[in-house]
């Protein structure tokens, strides 16, 4: 076999090492600043500039400033990481111009971290070692070897009590296939970034005696294969928001500089591609992907391997592969983050996909609303071409493949695959009837495979770490992890990647930190405008494509909006129907007219003029649209209504029969009154009333004129004595 | 069969004059590659990037040079939300109305913006300074509610913050005007 794929790659990897060696690293202080749309919006560019100026002014050449993608911790951005050799990495949150100054003078120059700005109060100076224990499916549920208990038992009491050593149980490291087989466990020692394979209590004693107490690495137990989550945990492992996650698709987000191909190569980037090309058997790739039980992450959940196999089976020689990066669900941003933070892994996934199905041309279809994502993908494609990873004769193996970017133009329906194809062809993005499926006849009538960004990001990991490993992370029918965009009424908004089969409760409470301001959780909305609202009682549902369908919602692309007691379910249903109605492409009548009429009914209900007959009509109409629309989006459009009618019917009935909005959100069904016992006559409400409709003089009772009141709620918000009541 | 008319040269020259040279060159490039008509959306992006909106004159020119019926070009331009057929203000205020922003009170920010500016969605203030637009989701849900003005994303916007926010852009416009003088 004279296939030079791997040899060429080894050359590239060596080059990457020497380039990175020249640039960094050993013994130098590193400062890394997040750089993605959300980070920039929060002001990370100014922070970067501030550090640059400080480094320049200090004249020190042992401080490196670099950009990374985003970690997905949106509500705490900008995030800055400071790594001083020999110390645990410190991450700062909500850094602004002034904090950057403080961090530089106090931490970098003075060696004292700015404690009040540390992310989630995570880092603790007294901690010398942190022992992170894998508590994934295999290691963590091993009854014979409870690592946490054994470490607690054997560590010197003083070390734990004084806080010099800290034990953390983290989610799956992703080491399962390379040993263990249910009888062993893994521990990562930070800040040394040493990974141990532990089989019994003696191993633990040896690690404690030699490494923790004396600082000598126990080579006998050390694992040299790098776990997929290791680089991420090494950087962010001390933060609960992160160590409860399992990062596969987001393995490099927040770790590498997304504009530096050598950093990607350094973390095994393109090795999967090289191995695939070396092997030289597309069928083998498809088998691997099929065996991994990877399912389409765009929402459909169609097995990726099967989709690829279908395209490969066709007799047509010209085939295309498309990455669907037209992330349109409101409340979903995981694709944007992946495109911005780790563009190379998606490109690599696409090249592998192209090879597997026998395509020589691929398209990135990206939303025009994501300028930074477009820029980074353009850059990634250029870099790959320069290194011979795209174009003719990739890695000298004779395989040729190239990528092209096509921009969307703001049409939600273009997420539907046949509509997307029309859009790439330069037409109006309207869907057509399937079959034929795109894998038989797609772009320009040729077999076409369309996968989502996250699906492609997973592909290199599957091939590098094995199908069995990937399959084991997930549930029986669905392998791997899923990235969710957590937003709405939740303490920690951001990106969360968890194994399939994790419960909603773990995602919302353990990682998301629960609902803010002591409010009660009402529902979890998943799947965007095609999904449903899952009530509190189903929070222990293990997340997977099939289980979410059982509770009348869908996985969708991964948007997860948390609703609390102040959110009116009927109003949320109205919001989604308004969205679907606005985005309906107009091709088929059920969707075009049906969503319009459903919206009218919902507006009547939230407006206080709904009748009992409206509820019957709404349900019938929703079922009709679901059954008879042309494309998947139309068929899914009534889901928010059907799911809420089923799970929250009482709330609809309160609107219709009692003319009351239980959440006190629908302004037509509420009124504001001033409690005579509480009003002190401070005049604040009257001053803030935009109408104005509040009368009363200083130190006397104020009264709202109900006939004039527009129910804006301003008085309710400004009153400091709780005298204004919402009824 | 591409339609050839007697005054083709004249029409072509007029079309070329209606567009900036780089876009004319781009269309020329596209025509050398397979499926040139598939680049219509990219071309319209470029035209809008240059002029800020798609005027009839430019759309006709694109249709002529790409040899795509004007009805199809108009069809595409009106189908996609991203394309504008009318000129817009100096600063585009894009209010995110995605789910996360909505549950965090974007509707009230919209009310305040409409009140302050005296315009509705899709309209431009009389002084030509601001245009108000709604976005389905800007993808920065963690910072909800979000308002994008020009290229700047502002997170955690409340109705109270709106006047001061607009004021900064009014001042910005003023200083830009001074500079250009």
Image (spheres, coloured by chain):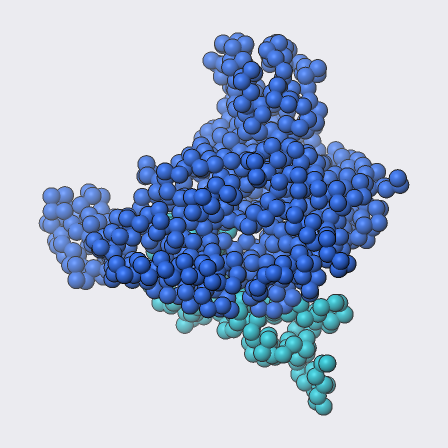
Chain colours: A blue, B cyan
Question: Is residue A226 or residue A437 the one in the foreground?
Answer: A437
Q: Quadrant of the N terminus of chain A?
A: top right
Image spot of residue A468 (x, y percent): 65, 33
Along the horizontal axis of the image, is A602 left or right of A441? left
Residue most extreme to the bottom: B6
Residue at 59 percent across and 11 percent down: it is A201
Task: Tell me, yes or no, if residue A363 can be seen here.
Answer: no
Q: Is residue A233 left or right of residue A488?
A: right
Specify the quadrant of the image occupied by residue A257.
top right
The answer to which of A384 and A122 lies nearer the viewer is A384
**Residue A703 to residue A28: above or below:** below
Residue at 66% across, 73% down:
B20
Give residue B83's position: percent from left, percent from top.
54, 68
Quarter where residue A474 is shown: top right
Q: Position of residue B168 (x, y in %)?
A: 43, 57
Q: Residue at x 68, y 75 (%)?
A: B66
| Residue A120, image x, y percentages | 46, 32
**Residue furthest right as drawn:** A2
């Amino acid at each position: 076999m004279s296939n030079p794929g791997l040899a060429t790659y080894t050359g590239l990897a060596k080059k990457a090492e020497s380039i990175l060696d020249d640039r960094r690293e050993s013994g130098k202080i590193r400062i890394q600043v997040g750089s993605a749309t959300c980070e920039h919006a929060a002001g990370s560019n100014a922070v970067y500039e501030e550090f640059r100026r400080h480094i320049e002014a200090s004249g020190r050449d042992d401080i490196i400033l670099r950009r990374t993608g985003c970690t997905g911790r949106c509500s705490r951005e900008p995030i800055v990481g400071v790594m001083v050799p020999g110390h645990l990495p410190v991450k700062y949150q909500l850094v602004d111009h002034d904090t950057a100054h403080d961090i530089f003078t106090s931490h970098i120059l003075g060696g004292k971290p700015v404690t009040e700005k540390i992310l989630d109060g995570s880092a603790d100076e007294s901690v010398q070692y942190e022992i992170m224990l894998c508590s994934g499916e295999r290691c963590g549920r091993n009854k014979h070897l409870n690592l946490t208990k054994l470490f607690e038992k054997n560590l010197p009491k003083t070390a734990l009590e004084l806080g010099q050593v800290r034990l953390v149980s983290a989610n799956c490291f992703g080491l399962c296939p390379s040993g263990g087989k249910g009888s062993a466990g893994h521990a990562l020692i930070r800040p040394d970034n040493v990974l141990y394979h532990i089989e019994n209590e003696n191993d633990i004693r040896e690690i404690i005696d030699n490494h923790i107490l004396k600082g000598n690495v126990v080579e006998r137990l050390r694992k040299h294969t790098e776990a997929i989550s290791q680089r991420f945990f090494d950087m962010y492992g001390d933060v609960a928001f992160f160590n409860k996650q399992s990062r596969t698709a987001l393995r490099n987000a927040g770790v590498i500089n997304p504009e530096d191909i050598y950093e990607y190569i350094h973390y095994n980037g393109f090795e999967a591609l090289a191995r695939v090309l070396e092997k030289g058997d597309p069928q083998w790739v498809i088998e691997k992907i099929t065996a991994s039980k990877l399912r389409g992450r765009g929402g459909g959940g169609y097995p990726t391997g099967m989709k690829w196999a279908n395209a490969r089976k066709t007799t047509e020689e010209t085939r295309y592969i498309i990455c669907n990066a037209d992330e349109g669900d409101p409340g979903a941003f995981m694709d944007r983050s992946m495109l911005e933070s780790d563009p190379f892994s998606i490109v690599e996934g696409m090249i592998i996909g192209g090879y597997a199905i026998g395509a020589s041309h691929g398209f990135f279809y990206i939303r025009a609303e994501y300028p930074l994502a477009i820029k980074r993908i353009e850059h990634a494609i250029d870099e790959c071409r320069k290194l011979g990873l795209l174009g003719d004769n990739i890695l000298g193996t004779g395989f040729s493949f190239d990528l092209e970017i096509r921009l969307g133009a703001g049409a939600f329906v273009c997420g539907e695959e046949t509509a997307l194809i029309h859009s790439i062809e330069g037409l109006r993005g309207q869907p057509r009837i399937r079959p034929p499926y795109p894998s038989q006849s797609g772009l320009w009538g040729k077999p076409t495979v369309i996968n989502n960004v996250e699906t492609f990001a997973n592909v290199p990991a599957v091939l590098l770490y094995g199908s069995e490993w990937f399959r084991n992370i997930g549930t029986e029918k669905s392998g791997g992890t899923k990235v969710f965009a957590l937003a709405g009424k939740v303490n920690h908004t951001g990106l969360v990647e968890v194994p399939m089969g994790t419960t909603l409760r773990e995602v919302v409470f353990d990682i998301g930190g629960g609902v803010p301001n002591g409010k009660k959780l009402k529902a979890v909305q998943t799947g965007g405008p095609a999904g449903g609202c899952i009530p509190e009682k189903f929070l222990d549902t293990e997340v997977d494509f099939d289980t979410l369908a059982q509770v009348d919602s869908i996985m969708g692309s991964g948007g997860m909006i948390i609703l609390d007691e102040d959110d009116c379910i009927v109003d949320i249903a109205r919001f989604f129907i308004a969205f679907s109605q606005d985005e309906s492409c107009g091709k088929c009548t059920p969707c075009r007219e049906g969503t319009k009429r459903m919206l009218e009914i919902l507006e009547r209900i939230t407006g206080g003029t709904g009748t009992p007959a409206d509820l019957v009509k709404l349900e019938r109409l929703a079922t009709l649209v679901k059954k008879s629309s042309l494309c998947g989006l139309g068929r899914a459009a009534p889901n928010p209504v059907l799911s809420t009618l089923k799970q929250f019917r009482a709330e609809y009935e309160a609107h219709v029969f009692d003319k009351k909005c239980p959440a006190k959100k629908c302004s037509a069904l509420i009124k504001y009154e001033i409690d005579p016992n509480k009003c002190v006559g401070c005049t604040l409400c009257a001053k803030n009333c935009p109408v104005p409709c509040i009368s009363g003089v200083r130190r006397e009772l104020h009264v709202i004129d109900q006939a004039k009141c527009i129910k804006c709620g301003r008085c309710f918000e400004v009153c400091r004595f709780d005298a204004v009541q919402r009824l | 069969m591409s339609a050839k008319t007697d005054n083709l040269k004249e029409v072509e020259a007029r079309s070329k004059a209606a567009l900036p040279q780089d876009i004319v060159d781009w269309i020329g490039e596209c025509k050398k590659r397979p499926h040139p008509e598939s680049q219509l959306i990219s071309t319209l992006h470029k035209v809008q990037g240059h002029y800020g909106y798609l005027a009839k004159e430019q759309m006709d020119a694109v249709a002529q040079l790409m040899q795509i019926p004007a009805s199809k070009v108009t069809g595409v331009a009106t189908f996609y939300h991203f394309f504008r057929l009318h000129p817009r203000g100096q600063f585009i205020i894009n209010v995110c109305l995605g789910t996360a922003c909505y549950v965090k009170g974007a509707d009230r920010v919209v009310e305040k913006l409409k009140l302050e500016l005296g315009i509705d969605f899709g309209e431009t203030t009389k002084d030509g300074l601001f245009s108000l637009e709604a976005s389905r989701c800007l993808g920065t849900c963690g910072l909800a509610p979000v308002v994008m003005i020009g290229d700047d994303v502002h997170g955690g916007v409340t109705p109270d913050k709106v006047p001061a926010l607009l004021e900064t852009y009014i001042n910005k416009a003023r200083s830009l005007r001074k500079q250009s003088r």
